[in-house]
């Protein structure tokens, strides 16, 4: 039973780190800061959650603490991404020419 | 120490050197503060890999968290002209 | 088999670490460096969890908990500084 859980946990672990690698790739390839925030934060949240779940499958008696770490990540990570995106927008960050919708500028005025 | 952890330590040491070079050669002071926070972050993981989790916890809280926080707070105060 | 999967996961996380480190070095604006710093912290949490699994010591996970709390505070302070609102 535990051997099967070990292999399943390893597969989940590898899929989580694949998401981390995709997020890092998006951080390098995206054209402007907002796309980079999008690629960098969402994929790494999912990647870390999957990694912690994989380790929890391998070591079932650690699952309480891993769940706590995952819960903190789930709360704090979107919050920091939102705060950083708002700071970049207010600082007048350059948008890529393909940007069509900017609700924040419609509501609060464009600073740039 | 297993070979995997040894490889991770070498990678972290190289990253620490690179972040230190960024710290002393940065153009603006905010980038320098951020890079010194990164040095502290890598040092904390390095302490953990060297089997000292309590030192790593202190380094993460003081070095990477509180020092960066304090530097940016003081920098914002200096810029806005409120010295009190 | 399981050891091989853990090694593969560590190699992928190391590649992600190097890519984000490049963005941290080259980022043209301070906001790029801040987001790269945040992602470096998150990848470090993964690395700490992997190290805890390899060494088999649950006490290492406490450091990951401290990281998950502190990266958030740091990014919020830096964002307030960039907004010129501190």
Image: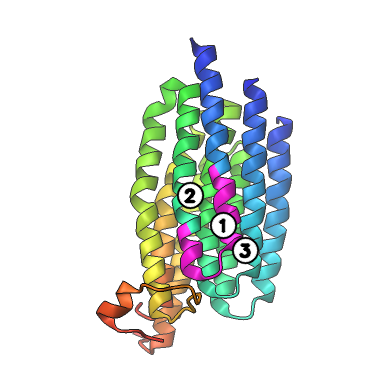
Q: Secondary structure at mark 1?
A: helix
The x, y position of residue C20, in whole percent, is: 61, 57
User: Is residue C11 shown above or below B83?
Assistant: above
The chosen color scheme is: rainbow
Spatial separation of the CA atoms under disc 2 and disc 1: 9 Å
Give the left or right position of residue C17, taking residue C38 as reference. right
Q: Quadrant of the N terminus of chain C?
A: top right
Crowding at label 3, few (<14), some or many (≥20) Cα neighbours within 10 Å?
A: many
Q: Which residue is mark 2?
A: A43
Tag shown at residue C23: 3
Of all chains, the one bearing label 3 is C
Q: Does the magenta-highlighted stretch encompass residue A32? A: yes
Q: Which residue is mark 1?
A: A26
Q: Which residues are magenta?
A: A19-38
- Above or below, C23 against A14 in this view is below
User: x, y (%) of residue C57?
Assistant: 53, 28
Q: Residue at x 44, y 47 (%)?
A: A45
Magenta stretch: includes residue B35: no
Closer to viewer: mark 1 or mark 3: 1
Mark toward the start of the polypeptide (2 vs 1) = 1
For the point 72% across and 38% down, the residue is B6
Category of crowding for the residue at label 2, using alpha-carbon neighbours closer than 10 angstroms: few (below 14), some (14–19), many (at least 20): many
Contact check, label 3 and label 2, Cβ < 8 Å: no
Alpha carbon separation for disc pair 3 and 2: 16 Å
Residue C10 x %, y %: 64, 37
Front residue of this view, candidates C2 and A36: A36
- The reply to whether callout 2 and callout 1 are in contact (CB within 8 Å) is yes
């Amino acid at each position: 039973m535990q051997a099967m859980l070990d292999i399943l946990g390893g597969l989940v672990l590898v899929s989580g780190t694949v998401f981390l690698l995709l997020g890092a790739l998006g951080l390098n390839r995206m054209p402007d800061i907002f796309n980079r925030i999008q690629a960098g934060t969402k994929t790494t949240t999912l990647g870390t959650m999957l990694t912690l779940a994989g380790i929890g499958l391998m070591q079932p008696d650690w699952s309480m603490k891993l769940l706590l770490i995952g819960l903190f990540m789930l709360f704090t990570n979107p919050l920091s991404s939102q705060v950083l995106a708002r700071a970049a927008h207010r600082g007048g960050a350059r948008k890529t020419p393909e940007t069509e919708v900017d609700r924040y500028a419609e509501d609060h005025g464009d600073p740039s | 120490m297993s070979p995997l952890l040894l490889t991770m330590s070498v990678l972290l040491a190289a990253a620490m050197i690179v972040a230190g070079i960024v710290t002393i050669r940065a153009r603006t002071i905010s980038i320098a503060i951020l890079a010194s926070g990164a040095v502290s972050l890598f040092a904390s993981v390095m302490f953990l890999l060297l089997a000292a989790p309590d030192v790593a916890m202190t380094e993460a809280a003081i070095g990477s968290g509180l020092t960066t926080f304090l530097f940016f707070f003081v920098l914002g105060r200096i810029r806005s002209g409120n010295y009190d | 088999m399981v050891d091989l999967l853990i090694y593969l996961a560590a190699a992928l996380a190391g590649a992600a670490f190097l890519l984000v480190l490049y963005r941290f070095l080259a980022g043209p604006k301070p906001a790029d460096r801040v987001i790269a710093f945040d992602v470096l912290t998150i990848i470090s949490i993964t690395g700490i969890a992997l190290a805890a699994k390899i060494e088999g010591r649950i006490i290492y996970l406490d450091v990951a908990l401290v990281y998950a709390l502190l990266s958030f505070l740091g990014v919020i302070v830096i964002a307030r500084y960039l907004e010129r609102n501190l």
